[in-house]
């Protein structure tokens, strides 16, 4: 099942993608949120006619660094002994088609293709098994990073915290198993930059959620980014950055200088 968040005149609303026989995909709006029993309304529209927003606005975004050995190596480091966790700000979130804005403070902004986990229910000091049962679904993320500021600051908050630095979308896929080895790719102007697989995750998804929930309570709708494969690199004004995860789809965002 694919859960979307859409723009409506009355405000954002959640919906579910349906496939009527002999017709293109449609969106059926939900009555309320997708956490718990889903209640469909009779409001239905073709998916192609519905403006998609970021599928969730989380209370917090926790991200995992160096969770692919290839990326750890290209950053000049080794795989950590336990998950390396940092936070991104909720105001970094944008949706499909929205512009990644390049701030004037940075001259080296990079793309980072990632599988993102959306938490479905409260988690605190959970086991890996409990964590796996708590997952609502998965979406595509781009952990945009001002690499020069990361080096200069010696930590991640500013480098990864600019508005628009966490594109999410296009929807939440509830029927997915990263353990099967899903392709994680990034193209910039259709040139392949990253081409990895979730089979190469150092720490698997249930272990990551268990680790994170040991120090902070994860709430429904919170997002955990699982790390990026090797191949990260710069994006520039006027380019199109597309991140995709096998079984979910593609998240496409233009790149624009802030204020441009």
Image: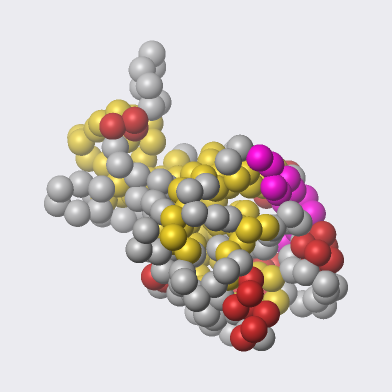
Residue 91's x, y, as percent?
A: 39, 70
Residue 4's x, y, as percent?
A: 38, 46
Residue 210 visible in the shown view: no
> Farthest left residue?
10
Q: Residue at x 63, y 58 (%)?
A: 234
Of residues 79 and 247, which is closer to you in this image?
79
Q: Quadrant of the C terminus?
A: bottom left
Residue 18's x, y, as percent?
A: 38, 31
Question: Residue 156 vs residue 136: left or right?
Answer: right
Q: Residue at x 52, y 45 (%)?
A: 240
Q: Quadrant of residue 163?
A: bottom left
Check the image and report above or below for 199 versus 43.
Answer: below
User: Where does the magenta region start and end?
Assistant: 191-205
Q: Residue at x 55, y 55 (%)?
A: 236
Check the image and report above or below for 55 versus 176.
Answer: below
Residue 179's x, y, as percent?
A: 72, 50
Q: Residue at x 30, y 28 (%)?
A: 46
Question: Residue 20 vs residue 239: left or right?
Answer: left
């Amino acid at each position: 099942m694919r859960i979307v968040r859409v723009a409506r005149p009355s405000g954002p609303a959640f919906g579910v993608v349906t496939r009527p026989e002999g017709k293109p995909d449609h969106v059926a709006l939900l009555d309320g949120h997708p956490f718990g029993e889903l209640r469909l309304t009779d409001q239905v529209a073709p998916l192609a006619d519905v403006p998609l927003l970021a599928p969730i606005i989380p209370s917090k975004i926790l991200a995992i660094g160096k969770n692919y050995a290839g990326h750890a190596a290209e950053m000049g480091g080794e795989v950590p002994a336990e998950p390396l966790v940092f936070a991104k700000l909720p105001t970094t979130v944008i949706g499909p088609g929205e512009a990644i804005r390049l701030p004037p403070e940075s001259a080296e902004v990079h793309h980072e293709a990632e599988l993102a986990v959306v938490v479905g229910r409260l988690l605190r000091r959970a086991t890996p098994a409990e964590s796996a049962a708590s997952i609502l679904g998965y979406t595509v993320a781009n952990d945009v990073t001002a690499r020069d500021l990361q080096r200069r600051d010696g930590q991640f908050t500013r480098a990864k915290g600019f508005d628009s630095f966490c594109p999410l979308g296009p929807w939440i896929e509830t029927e997915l198993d990263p353990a099967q080895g899903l392709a994680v790719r990034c193209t910039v102007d259709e040139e392949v930059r990253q081409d990895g697989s979730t089979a190469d995750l150092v720490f698997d998804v249930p272990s990551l959620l268990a680790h994170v929930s040991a120090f902070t309570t994860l709430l429904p709708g919170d997002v955990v980014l699982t790390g990026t494969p090797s191949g990260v690199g710069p994006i520039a004004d006027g380019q199109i950055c597309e991140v995709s995860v096998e079984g979910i789809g593609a998240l496409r965002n233009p790149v624009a200088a802030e204020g441009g």
